[in-house]
Amino acid sequence: MNFLVIVICLAINYLWLKDFDRFDDTWFFRFRCKVEEFCSETAAKVRMAWSIGILAIYAIPMLCLAVLLLITGDNFYGLPTMIVHILVLLIAFDRNQPGKLVSEFLERWQAGDMEACAAYLNQELAKGGSLDVSDQEALAAYFNRQLTYRCFEKMFVMFFWYMLAGPMGVLFCYVSYQLRDSHKEDQLQEQVALVALVIHVLEWIPIRLLAITFSLAGNFVHCFENTKRIFWDISKDTDNAELLHGLTACALTGMVKFDAGEDGGEQQSEEFGRVREVAEIEALLGLLERSQAIWLSVLALITIFGL
């Protein structure tokens, strides 16, 4: 059933809801504030009281999901259970398809409006802050980095943990990422460190599986050599977003094709620079789409042979 649920979710995401922001994640911030406020009042004198709040934030949604799955059970040939699985995955999946993110960014990029590109990055991919619009190459590299990591955390991590632990695993990942993203001004460093460690553990295996996938979907020699180098790295200080960005660069070595034209001065050089960046972004999108197809093929084989 798991593979069928993934295919249905991807179909709904791509064909029906690709232009619709299905779920408002701001509920999580309000939920987190309520839980932490309640826990801080009831456990004010308990050492490490903040950890009680974190545990409650994980436990309450997962307990609700467990009860819901218990109620649905195998009734009506398991259809209600499948609907629950689909809803959980849709909540955890990305709001926009990677192709839509790329097309909207490139529309602004090809128009030469770097201010609009920076605003789009802050709105869709970043967590806020100012970007240097004078450096086109750095701006495009930032988009590539954010796009790759967003696809990884919203899609590949969810694929892996859904196949391993079902909707409970997906919900655990979703809560972890929401805890990281729902910033609070008075947030303790201990909370930040704990959530970062949990996410690092959740991503450790998927990022290595995706690195192997990049090797198969891109330049095998360059990417696989780097995959072997980082495969057994267990350092919690590793920046997974930067690691993925480096792996995609290796996978795309020699695969980006564009017409450089003739050197016609600084203005024309900037135009050709934008053309080169467009080719690199489109190549990255192709790599991510091929990697997704490989994962789906492997999941189908696992489903068929019951591995």
Image (spheres, rainbow, N blue to C red):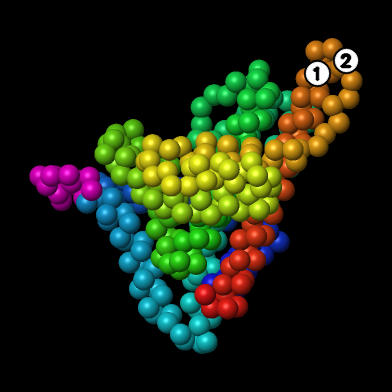
On the image, the x and y values in percent for residue 84 come to 49, 71
**Magenta-highlighted residues:** 39-51
Instruction: From this view, report whether residue 225 is shown above or below residue 278.
Output: below
Give the residue at x 25% y 50%. 53
Instruction: From this view, report whether residue 89 is shown above or below residue 225.
Output: below
On the image, the x and y values in percent for residue 110 come to 78, 31
On screen, residue 260 versus residue 113, left or right, reads right
Of the pair 34 and 194, the residue shown nearer to us: 194
Residue projecting furthest to the bottom:
76
Instruction: From this view, report whether residue 59 is shown above or below residue 286.
Output: below
Give the residue at x 53% y 61%. 159
On the image, the x and y values in percent for residue 163 come to 50, 67
In the rendered image, is residue 178 in sight? no
- Residue type at the position of mark 2: Gly
Give the residue at x 29% y 41%. 191
Q: Are marks 2 and 1 in contact (CB under 8 Å)?
A: yes
Reply yes or no: does residue 46 show up in magenta.
yes
On screen, residue 16 versus residue 167, left or right, reads right
Q: Which secondary structure, mark 1?
A: helix
- Residue type at the position of mark 1: Ser
Q: Identify the residue position indicated by label 2 in the image.
A: 264
Of the pair 106 and 254, the residue shown nearer to us: 254
Tell me which numbered mark, 2 or 1, is placed earlier along the sequence.
2
On screen, residue 217 versus residue 78, left or right, reads right
Residue 3 image label: none
Reply yes or no: does residue 304 show up in magenta.
no
In the rendered image, is residue 283 in sight? yes
Of the pair 137 and 71, the residue shown nearer to us: 137
Residue projecting furthest to the left:
45
For label 1, the crowd category at 10 Å Cα-Cα, with few meaning under 14, some 14 to 19 and many 20 or more, is: some
Q: Identify the residue position indicated by label 1 in the image.
A: 269
